[in-house]
Every structure is written in structure tokens, then in C-alpha cells.
């Protein structure tokens, strides 16, 4: 990144851009299939607060993925990766996932049972 040195730790630096990348086990597998031009359905839980953002990114960048996520109350967990290039290490910061409550898991089971059984579907969890 422009303007960063190994001595930048502890300072406040501006960045040129940032990106939020929807991810998760099922979605990452479906992304790999998309790169191979293989259609797939990605399923699992997604937070109501940021579901629309995820759908917009997938529609714009991944034409072979059909998202079929069960929408749960709340926000999908955001993971942050901090990279220390000087020492060749990284740290992953993440909050606890709170989407998997009794009601959302019951709805997920119903959604998976009702899913179209033709084609390739990817589901991975917790």
C-alpha cells in the first residue's frame, strides 16, 4: 500500500481504498467454482443488516453464484486481518458470531429442505 512503511505501526495513516469482501466457507467454495465458470448455490446464514450489500457484491462480481442465504436478525460477523510485513506475520481479529440462534437455525433447516435439488449447492457452517 502506498504510504506505509514497516515503521508505520502505531500511527494513523490514510488508505486509498477499502473493500468489504463477503466470505465464509460456503461462499468461498462457490467463488472458486465461479472462477471455473461452474454454477452453484451458496447457502447458510447471513445477517439482515448487511445482506443487501452481500447480494450486490455477488451480483456484480460473481455471475455463477446463486445466493440462497437464510437471513437472520443482526449483522454478519466482520473479520479484520492485520499484516506485519516486516516480521512476516498476520493477525486475524473477529467477533463472536451471534447469528446462529434457535430460530435462525430452524429457519435455515427449513430453507435447506425447500431448496431446489437440481444443480450444485454448497453449504458449510460454524
Image (tube, rainbow, N blue to C red):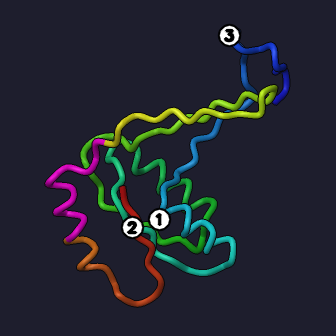
For residue 66, side relative to residue 125 (left or right): right
Classify mark 3: helix, strand or loop. Answer: loop
Residue pointed to by mark 2: 43
Is the C-beta separation of discs 2 and 1 under 8 Å?
yes
The answer to whether residue 124 is above or below residue 103 is: below
Residue pointed to by mark 1: 26
Residue located at (35% from left, 37% from top): 96
Question: Of label 3 and label 2, which has the lower sequence position?
Answer: 3
Residue located at (30% from left, 61% from top): 70
Image quadrant in which you'd find residue 42: bottom left
Query: Magenta segment, which residues?
Result: 98-109
For residue 31, side relative to residue 36 (left or right): left
Q: CA distance from mark 3 to mark 2?
A: 39 Å
Question: Of label 3 and label 1, which has the lower sequence position?
Answer: 3
> Which marked residue is nearer to the observer: mark 2 or mark 1?
1
Q: Nearer the viewer, residue 42 or 55?
A: 42
Mark 1: few/some/many CA within 10 Å (<14, 14-19, 20+): some
Q: Where's the N terminus, which quadrant? A: top right
Q: CA distance from mark 2 to mark 1?
A: 7 Å
Rendering coords of residue 40 (x, y %): 51, 77
Q: Any mark on residue 10, and which?
A: 3
Mark 2: few/some/many CA within 10 Å (<14, 14-19, 20+): many
Q: Nearer the viewer, residue 114 or 10?
A: 10
Amino acid at each position: 500500500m502506498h504510504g506505509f512503511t514497516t515503521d508505520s505501526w502505531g500511527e494513523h495513516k490514510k488508505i486509498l481504498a477499502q473493500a468489504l469482501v463477503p466470505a465464509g466457507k460456503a461462499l468461498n467454495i462457490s467463488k472458486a467454482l465461479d472462477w471455473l465458470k461452474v454454477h452453484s448455490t451458496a447457502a447458510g446464514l447471513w445477517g439482515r443488516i448487511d445482506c443487501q450489500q452481500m447480494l450486490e457484491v455477488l451480483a456484480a462480481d460473481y455471475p455463477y453464484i446463486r445466493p440462497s442465504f437464510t437471513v437472520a436478525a443482526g449483522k454478519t460477523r466482520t473479520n479484520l486481518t492485520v499484516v506485519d510485513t516486516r516480521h512476516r506475520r498476520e493477525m486475524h481479529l473477529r467477533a463472536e458470531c451471534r447469528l446462529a440462534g434457535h430460530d435462525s437455525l430452524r429457519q435455515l433447516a427449513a430453507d435447506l429442505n425447500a431448496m431446489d435439488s437440481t444443480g450444485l449447492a454448497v453449504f458449510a457452517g460454524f
